[in-house]
Amino acid sequence: MRKINNSTILGNSGAPTTSGDMLKVRNDGTLAWEAIDSTDLLPFEWGGGRGVFAGGESSSNVIQYITIANTGNATDFGNLLAGAGQVAGCSNVSRGVFFGGGSSTNVIQYITIANTGNATDFGDLTEGRYGAGGTSDGYRGVCLGGYDGSSWHAGTIDYITISTTGNASAFGHLSALQGNGDAFTNGVRAVHGGQQGGIGNQIEYITISTLGDAKDFGDLTGGNTEQPAAVADLSDRGIFAGGSRSASASNIIDFVTISSTSNATDFGDLTQARYGLGGVSNGTRGVFAGGAGNKDTIDYITIASAGNATDFGDLLSGGMAGGNVSGD
């Protein structure tokens, strides 16, 4: 929400202005009305034209991309700083950020989504981990859970300001048994689902602008769900796709309404059962790529319309494409 010239405006506020106040989130998570500058008036944008997948099987450092609206095979983008399987990702409209990966590394790195090339150092997580979930509200990026080197049940939540390089700060915690899932957002709330072992069908949420621990949202339709992909659309719908259920790869696609709390509902099926896949969205179409076992499959759905996924193309190299971001 923005307050400009003493008027409350919801959503995108239109043309930039040099006067008035804006409710801003400070680095410590508190809110304050402060003067507007030109960088504050970039509206939150969902998805983007380009989807980027980073990392993969056997600590691959490959970054590859697709144009979300056009089916076809992935194209080489560049390389991560080091090989990093199961990285997490978040983005604003122009910058993609990748968290952790590899052997529980704490490295954060970034790319400019519109420009192909290698990743650049951003900073460090509060603790090293891989298999985390990542998402953002376009300003603040969050990294949820992951494997910390001793337990899949690392419930740590970190946050960064995407436009400013630097180390992550502590946000809060997932429940004790959340570690190996993924997350999506409606721009206000981040929703995380899936994990390694334990109560694997649990879904939790946070309000991205407010520091604190996650709260219960509901349950996925299946049993233990490890390493699903997560995407969302413009209409407040979030999708979890694939994963490993009861030690077997799953083709199940579930959906929820992000602004409410409830159990997930069946959406349809992927073209191929798999876990460790990545997901990107342009606000209308959700695209799922890769998977454990060097799978190179890419398939897609229209998020607003329940049904089975359709073939999109192939990755250049298959594997766990967990580091996924989208933008222009």
Image (spheres, helix red, strand yellow):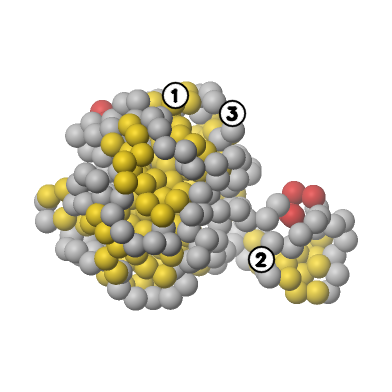
- The image quadrant that residue 166 belongs to is top right
Q: Are marks 3 and 1 in contact (CB under 8 Å)?
A: no
Task: Please give the residue where the numbered disc 3 appears in the rendered image.
Answer: 115
Residue 183: percent from left, percent from top: 40, 56
| Secondary structure type for disc 3 | loop
Residue furthest to the right in view is: 19
Q: Residue at x 54, y 26 (%)?
A: 116
Query: Mark 2 near mark 1, Cβ–Cβ under 8 Å?
Result: no
Q: Amino acid at mark 2?
A: Gly
Q: Nearer the viewer, residue 76 or 117?
A: 76
Q: Could you say where residue 276 lies in the image, as x and y percent from the top left?
A: 27, 43
Of the two numbered discs 2 and 1 on the same chain, state the one appearing first in sequence: 2
What whole-number distance in Å separates the C-alpha atoms at marks 3 and 1? 11 Å
Where's the C terminus, which quadrant? top right
- Give the quarter of the image for residue 156: bottom left
Mark 3 / mark 2, whichever is N-terminal = 2
Callout 2 crowding tier (Cα within 10 Å): few <14, some 14–19, many ≥20: few
The image shows residue 315, relative to residue 241, as above or below, that is above
Residue that carries the numbered disc 1 in the rendered image: 76
Residue under pointer 2: 11
Corner quadrant of residue 100: top left
